[in-house]
Amino acid sequence: VQTESAGSQTSIKVIVRIRPQNQIEMQNNYKTVVKVVDDKMLIFDPKEDQNPFFYHGVAQKGRDLLKKQNKELQFVFDKIFDVTSDNSDVFEGSTKDLICNLLDGYNCSVFAYGATGAGKTHTMLGSDEDPGITYRTVAELFSQIEKQSEQREFNLGVTYLEIYNENVQDLLHKSGPLHLRDDGRCGVIVAGLKIITIQNAEELLTLLAKGNKNRTQHPTDANEESSRSHAVFQVYINITNRLDGQVRQVKLSMIDLAGSERASATGCKGARFKEGANINKSLLALGNCINKLADGAKHITYRDSKLTRLLKDSLGGNCQTVMIANITSSSFSYEDTYNTLRYANRAKKI
Ligand code: ADP
Ligand code: MG
């Protein structure tokens, strides 16, 4: 067994979420290539046991000769959510703890990473029955703000934008492409992006629904193309200390990243390929930042993509980051799962 041990740092929490297998994966006798050992450890591509794996109580006999590589790689993460977890469990074990840091004045960011179909949007947005962690996190934020309202006054504004083809578009307000501008005091700002004030988490649900209608492809489309854009939701909080009148601003960023599958794997050509290449540009730049941060490098290049420029003040330093790596356990997505686990494993060292 090749062990990948956990880093000792605290500024990034890396979480893996495994979605239930879908109809196609179940029906076609694919192998299960992710074996969960406990809530922190999993084995990717385990050696065949004498006993078959059980999936939802059903023995998995499927032999997938082409995929039979048996890397037997052991990974350790801060937390692993198995197929039985719902968004409430994921929220409790991931972003709930961020709120304290946020209200203490540290920017926080949350990423959903993974290939198309791996469960990113389900995790971030969820459904009416099981709202995603974006809503749950903001609801918790309001509940904690309530408790502190005698000492401090809070004002919340949200923005929701999309990065598609390295173009930035406001999802809450019809706009042309928006430009990023370096503002000495405030860091990078999106010129013309509308900040909408909200008073409670329910207003957020309305805004998210509105924003999703404006996305280049609706994020819940089964269509593969639905995952070529990054959806960036941000909450700006102005905190005024009632005693001395001091004001500070903090920011929470929650990002449903574009699918991490490589452009080549989707057979992209021409215009399509450009989309893929640009997605890779932002994802690649994010990966490079993460690598640099993991290496403890002094100089981090945020300038390489729209996504990293936008998140310059929300990555590294005193910022708290949660990365949720979404995977499926089916050998159908062997390469995607392997790549996602490696990416997540790298991030862990920050
Ligand atoms: P992505 O955004 O990564 O492309 P989605 O979140 O759209 O993937 O998920 C693909 C499909 O799988 C959707 O139909 C979604 O409802 C379903 N799905 C994803 N994760 C889960 C989960 N944890 N439990 C149940 N269904 C899920
Ligand atoms: Mg999606």
Image (spheres, rainbow, N blue to C red):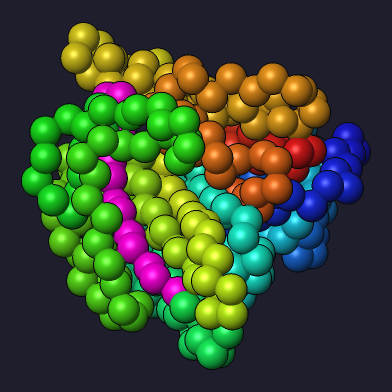
Identify whether 284 is placed above or below 227.
Answer: above
Identify whether 11 is placed above or below 265.
Answer: below
Which residue is located at x 33 percent, y 29 percent?
180
Q: Where the N terminus falls, by quadrant?
A: top right
- Residue 165 shown in magenta: yes
Image-quadrant location for residue 297: top right
Q: Nearer the viewer, residue 273 or 178?
A: 178
Q: Nearer the viewer, residue 268 or 203?
A: 203
- Left or right of 275: which side holds 176? left
Question: Whole-percent x and y of residue 204?
Answer: 29, 71
Which residue is located at x 65 percent, y 49 percent?
319
Can you see residue 295?
yes
Q: Residue furthest front?
A: 244
Which residue is located at x 61 percent, y 27 percent?
289
Q: Nearer the viewer, residue 94 or 245?
A: 245
Question: Whole-percent x and y of residue 303?
Answer: 49, 20
Identify whether 221 is placed above or below 316.
Answer: below
Image-quadrant location for residue 217: top left
Can you see residue 120?
no
Which residue is located at x 70 percent, y 48 percent?
318
Q: Where the C terminus falls, by quadrant?
A: top right
Question: Whole-percent x and y of residue 307?
Answer: 43, 32
Chief secondary structure of the magenta portion: strand
Question: Whole-percent x and y of residue 192?
Answer: 20, 40
Q: Nearer the viewer, residue 101 or 27?
A: 101
Q: Residue furthest top?
A: 270
Q: Which residues are magenta?
A: 154-166
